Image: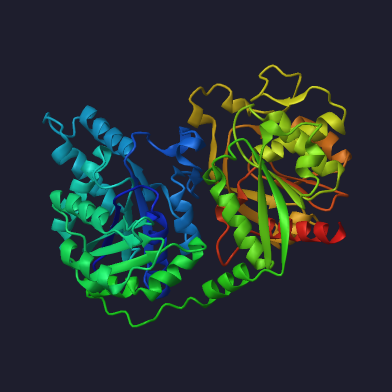
Amino acid sequence: MGQVKYIFVTGGVTSSLGKGIISASLGKLLKARGLSVTIQKFDPYINIDPGTLNPYEHGECYVTEDGAETDLDLGHYERFLAANTSQKNNVTTGRIYNNVITKEREGEYLGKTVQVIPHITDEIKRNFLALGHNGDYDVIITEIGGSVGDIESLPFIEAMRQTRWDLGHENCIVIHLTLIPYLKAVGELKTKPTQHSVKKLLESGIQPDILVCRSERAINMEIKKKLALFCNVPINSVISSIDAKTIYDVPLLMQKEKLDERVLELFKMSVNKAPGLEQWKDFLTRLKNPKQEVNIALVGKYVELHDAYKSIAESFIHAGAKNECKVNISWISSEEVTNENAEELLGHQNGILIAPGFGERGFEGKIIAAKYAREKNVPFFGICLGLQVAVIEFGRNVLGIKHAHSTEMDPICKDPIIDLMEEQKKITKKGGTMRLGAYPCKLKKGTAVQSLYDSEEITERHRHRYEFNNDYLEQFENKGMIAAGINPDSNLVEIMELKNHPWFVGTQFHPELKSRVVDPHPLFIGFINAAIDHMAKN
């Protein structure tokens, strides 16, 4: 297509309006027209990445194929575009400053005084454009985190202004997402917050090209005209984004509002192909018209914030639609699970998923949940720490290894069924001991997981530090818990599967990170199928 086109998406009035979903939806529409599209997220916080952030602070940490720990919005990008992102797709203020300070220490600035302008803004601009250098993409969408007016965002906004000046308006446009609140007392939608938000952008030297107006009620033509007049945009650049029942409705709503058409007009791009969204519409039909329902317990330590397990929740939606089944998630705090209340909390569930996590808080509650699933023949799915919980419970209660534990929880435990690898033990920095990104896995023939994947070799994404201790593997396999997946390079256990159980699978990797809207992950499909069978029998 020639010159790469750049779209910046900013937000005003309040955070959490859905910039990520609007970006992903626009990307979906442009890709459906035959364009090559990627999306990147620039976050204004000073952490290098979300890897060390508590999930309560920022939700899930999403891991890419190349091992980058990123913002959860990259999960939306991948799920909507059905394409992988990378380290380059998520940049923070922390990384920008780290890069600039490193260059200064190496003498790259030739003794000049290092300042926000031009050095910080130049580094931001360099990262804005980095994905466009190889000619892999026709359109690059950049979401700027936070809201216009935030102190932390000012260098990003200035860098965006300069980038737009450098590239020209035909190659770079700005979409501004704002809130149109509805005041019940007067029965009106109010445009003033959006007007002030646009004014704030104008103070920074940026005139938005398109306004996307988020509201709980439809925005009529009179309001669109008012916004167009006072915000200096054509009326066909005022896009209504009414609250949707599901985020997967948004691409179709944006198509109806002609957001993609307006973008192409501004870029003067002649793309005649209309978006082909048949598979997406078929997914929505099955999602909204389920033939049955199942109840799944998600047992974790961060359940008060559902975004902490965002990819798992979305994977249930994808697999549920594939099975024409509504998945009702019960968010159960592992700290609350005891031997006394396990039946009350878990007895009506058709499946139990032990969620990933770090640390000992709530660990014993997860052990109890895994034991309940094993003994009561309830379909069980353990992810990352969930696998480790399952094998420790099995070691204690089936193999009779009384002190079975993880050295993460008990560094001096007598039977470290879960332990650090020898080469990891001398590393002290937290990130250094992590296995991050995609690793290969060889599946054992005849296992349930091998039949679900319909393959003998797979790759899956990891984010963990501790491993199954192979010194105990023979004992486990003799009692029916087998290593269904092994890393062919390191011989590390990747999947454990319990024989003579309806469905009992633990994975050291995170399958939820590779589930897509029209291509659900096979393990989630299998788990929901098992939950449906359990419901039918009970």
435 relative to 326 in the view: left or right: left
Q: Quadrant of residue 383?
A: top right
Where the C terminus falls, by quadrant? bottom right
**Which residue is depicted at the point 13% across and 57% down?**
165
Q: Is residue 5 visible to us here?
A: no
Residue 466 against residue 83 in the figure, above or below: above
At which x and y percent is residue 518?
57, 67
**Which residue is depicted at the point 49% across and 31% down?**
431
Residue 112 against residue 241 in the figure, above or below: above
Residue 257 against residue 4 in the figure, above or below: below
**Which residue is depicted at the point 24% across and 48% down?**
126
Task: Farthest residue to the bottom: give it.
Answer: 272
At which x and y percent is residue 433?
54, 30
Q: Nearer the viewer, residue 410 or 3?
A: 410
At which x and y percent is residue 273?
38, 81
208 relative to 67 in the view: left or right: left
At which x and y percent is residue 9?
30, 56
Q: Quadrant of residue 417?
A: top right
Where the N terminus falls, by quadrant? bottom left
Q: Is residue 363 visible to us here?
A: yes
Residue 197 against residue 100 in the figure, above or below: below
Q: Nearer the viewer, residue 380 or 199?
A: 199
